[in-house]
Image (cartoon, grey):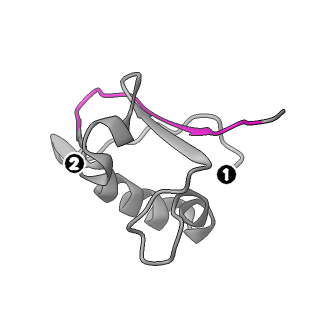
Amino acid sequence: MGKNELDLHLDDEEITVHKLLEVLEAKMGKKLINLIFKSKEKKYLSEYILIILNDRDIRTIEGLNTIIQKDDLVLFMPVIAGG
């Protein structure tokens, strides 16, 4: 939180979005993770955060099981709505 960009270097050639979120939780704490998930069980993503993998919402791919490969770009974006 408070950072615009974080460059992570992981040992694995590919990981799931769920595993990435576990790494981020260990690195940045629970506050970020609490914004991303609807509940403490960490099964359902909040409707107020988009996770974008190479210009595609992960919900349209495989959700938390979406595979992230080396050199992929992952964005976390807040949903903005209004009337």
- For label 1, the SS is loop
Instruction: Kindly give the residue lying farthest to the bottom in the view shown.
Output: 40
In x, y percent, where is residue 27?
Answer: 48, 61
Mark 1 and mark 2: Cα distance apart in space: 22 Å
59 sits left or right of 31 in the view? left
Please say if the residues under marks 1 and 2 sit with CB atoms less than 8 Å apart: no
Task: Name the residue: 36% across, 24% down.
Answer: 54
Which numbered dot is residue 1?
1
The quarter holding residue 14 reads top left
Residue 7: % across, % down: 45, 36
Q: In the image shown, does 59 or 73 lie closer to the viewer?
A: 59
- Residue at the location (21% across, 48% down)? 15
Residue at the outermost right position: 83
Residue situated in front as seen by the camera: 14 or 55: 55
Q: Quadrant of residue 13?
A: top left
Residue 15, numbered circle: 2
The part of the chain drawn in magenta is: 68-81
Residue 46 lies, in percent from the top left, at: 54, 56
In the rendered view, would you say 45 is above or below 78? below
| Residue 19 falls inside the magenta stretch | no
Magenta run includes residue 69: yes
Residue type at mark 1 is Met
